[in-house]
Amino acid sequence: MLEPIYAENVIVGVIHKKQFQWYVTDRELWYLDYVKFAQAFENEGDLAVDEYIEPERKGMEILGSENAGLFLKRIESYKGDAATLLKLFEDKIESGEEEDVLDFIPSFLVDFDQKVFYSLFPEPASFEEYVPSDWKGTYEDFTGLIPETEKYWVNKDGESLFEV
């Protein structure tokens, strides 16, 4: 698992086959539709989708429910769990690096079952606009949708570390 770094290595919640899992990955993996993403940045109409594709996404210009299983296998080394993320978060706070609390805000919730992409990404990148055509992409606070047992920002006393 990578260490979360504000707007670079992002924390992503994934729902696939009714299972919830955290990942900490490079943000670039989460443009679900690289074709749309490339079109937005190509002036001449000459699409160079390959320029944008990360190795984990090779052969998956559009990431959706159909190829999610293969993709999630490829990023297995980036898996995280609530206990590990909580420990990292608490260590960051104890070290006095409280300004780095933003590193631990989850950036995306990707629901491959319902075909919904939620973004809380803190910088102007609009990941939610680059989703497959049969998906819904939205920019909103999705933390209320996270299962209670997966809320790594809540300590054993029930306090949110974002408010400490």
Image (cartoon, rainbow, N blue to C red):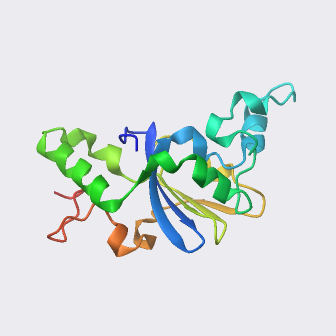
Q: Is residue 41 above or below residue 120?
A: above
Decide if residue 11 is in sight here. Answer: no
Observer-nearest residue: 44 or 38?
Answer: 38
Left or right of 47? Residue 151 is left
- Residue 82 at what x, y percent from top left? 33, 61
Decide if residue 161 is in sight here. Answer: yes
Name, please, the residue furthest toward the top. 44
Query: What residue sits 12% from the left and 45% below the top?
Result: 94
Q: Is residue 99 above or below residue 120?
A: above
Query: What residue sits 55% from the left and 47% below the top?
Result: 75
Q: How many marks are shown on the rendered structure?
A: 0
Query: What residue sits 78% from the left and 42% below the top?
Result: 35
- Residue 37 at what x, y percent from top left? 71, 40
Q: Quadrant of the N terminus?
A: top left
Q: Quadrant of the C terminus?
A: bottom left
- Residue 73 at what x, y percent from top left? 59, 52
Query: What residue sits 51% from the left and 50% below the top?
Result: 76
- Residue 69 at what x, y percent from top left? 65, 59
Examine the image and state in which quarter residue 2 appears: top left
Q: Is residue 15 above or below residue 86?
A: below
Left or right of 100? Residue 7 is right
Observer-nearest residue: 77 or 156?
Answer: 77
